[in-house]
Image: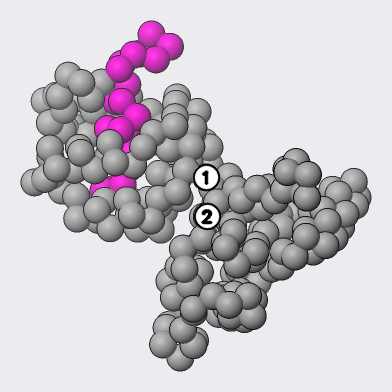
Amino acid sequence: MLAGYSAAALFGSRWIDATAPAELIRRGSRRGTDGVVVHAETILDDEVCTLADMRVTSSARTAFDLGRRLVLDTAVEQLDALCRATRLDPAHVAELADRHSGARGVRRLRQALPLVDPGAESLPETRVRLLLVRGGLPRPSTQVPVAGVDGRVLGWADLGWKQWRTLVEYDGIHHWTDERQRTKDIERYEAFAALGWSVVRVNSEQLRLRPASVVERVRMRLRAAGAPVRPPSAHNSR
């Protein structure tokens, strides 16, 4: 049956390397071939489903396998994407961790699950969220709605804290290369500011090369808004 990244791709999960080898679970021999990785695993009947006439690990089992095989941050990124694509509740993955408590990598999976948020729409959004949480800031909500005085939603922000009217937006390349998108951003952020929201914008260079600065910028906005955040000396921002 298809498993791992192959199953995740079939479920519609994004951010999967198309050049990665196919993954299968097969009882008995683990011998694979070029471009195919075979896992020999204990798998129960309710952990298998059929998609496109193919046997596939269920969404929960797929998340269980990815979460225990990948390094922590990559596991969170992939589980964010899979849970978003399938509307999978991470609690169902935790149930499998209890069922297969002796399986290899379960401890790593248990570390990843509390960090998962299906609201993330991209890998950078997940990375920004992890950075802020590890920097000691309150965990932000994802896809935060900003409503006007009439209650109509004017837009959605990547991350934020509604109680402190503070938002964090990741600006991908299209925010800079698409003139229409830039115009939309300018107007949207002006509307947010008029309603009392503060917006911290983050790009790829800042996330990659100056992560501590990103955390501190957000920390300052939260403190100005009255959030009970601790000083940066108490944390090690990566």
Location of residue 211 with respect to 10 vertically, above or below: below
Location of residue 36 with respect to 180 vertically, above or below: above
Where is residue 116? Give x, y as percent.
Answer: 40, 50
Q: Is residue 180 visible?
A: yes
Label 2: state its secondary structure: strand
| Residue to which mark 1 is pinned | 119
Task: Verify whether residue 53 appears in magenta.
Answer: yes
Which residue does the image show at 60% across and 67% down from the upper left? 164
Where is residue 41? Give x, y as percent.
Answer: 16, 33
Which residue does the image show at 42% across and 83% down from the upper left? 235
Q: Is residue 4 visible?
A: no
Task: Verify whether residue 10 appears in magenta.
Answer: no
Quarter of the image holding residue 96?
top left
Query: Which portion, as a residue range, is magenta?
Result: 49-69
| Residue to which mark 2 is pinned | 141
In the rendered view of the protein, which quadrant contains the N terminus? top left
Q: Which mark is residue 216?
A: none
Instruction: Specify few, some or many for label 1: CA neighbours under 10 Å numbering under 14, 14-19, or 20 or more.
Output: some
Which amino acid is tagged 2? Ser
